Amino acid sequence: MTIYIGNIPYSLQEADIEELFAKYGPVISVKIITDKFTHKSKGYGFVEMENESEAESAIENINGTDVLGRNLKVNRANPRKNG
């Protein structure tokens, strides 16, 4: 399952996010979206977890959590739209 994570502190790294989500189950991948010119974080990203029930638990427990002064917004990612 792919999870959207928003309001990420700009200093947070993908490894930090993986560590946060790994408490709930195996993490397949973490991707923080960056600006293509500056390569700085845009403040959101995606986490992919292999088990749906563990992913739901992570969403429920991490959503709204304060990380470095910012409340994370975590929910199920919407499927990509082609076009």
Image (tube, helix red, strand yellow):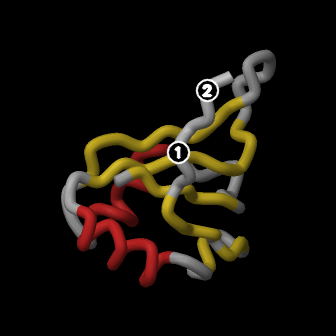
In the rendered image of this protein, does residue 10 appear above or below residue 61?
Answer: above
Residue 16 in view (yes/no): no
Mark 1, Cα crowd under 10 Å, few <14 / some 14-19 / many 20+, is: few
Kindly tell me whether residue 51 is visible in this rendering. Answer: yes
Position of residue 35 measured from the top left corner of the image (x, y, whole percent): 75, 27
Quarter assignment of residue 38 = top right
Q: What is the C-alpha distance between the residues marked 2 and 1? A: 9 Å
Task: Report the residue that reaches farthest toward the top.
Answer: 37
Q: Amino acid at mark 1?
A: Pro
What x and y, as percent, mark residue 17? 45, 56
Q: Which residue is mark 2?
A: 82
**What residue is shown at x 68% (from left), y 58% (from top)?**
9
Q: Position of residue 46 (x, y in %)?
A: 51, 47
Q: Quadrant of the C terminus?
A: top right
Q: How many marks?
A: 2
Residue 66 vs 40, above or below: the answer is: below
Identify which residue is drawn at 58% across, 52% down. Answer: 12
**For mark 1, what is the residue?**
79
Question: Circle 1 — which element?
Answer: loop
Say if 78 sits above or below 38 in the image.
Answer: below
Estimate the x, y position of residue 2 in percent, counting from the top left.
Answer: 41, 51
| In the depicted structure, whether residue 23 falls above or below residue 79 | below
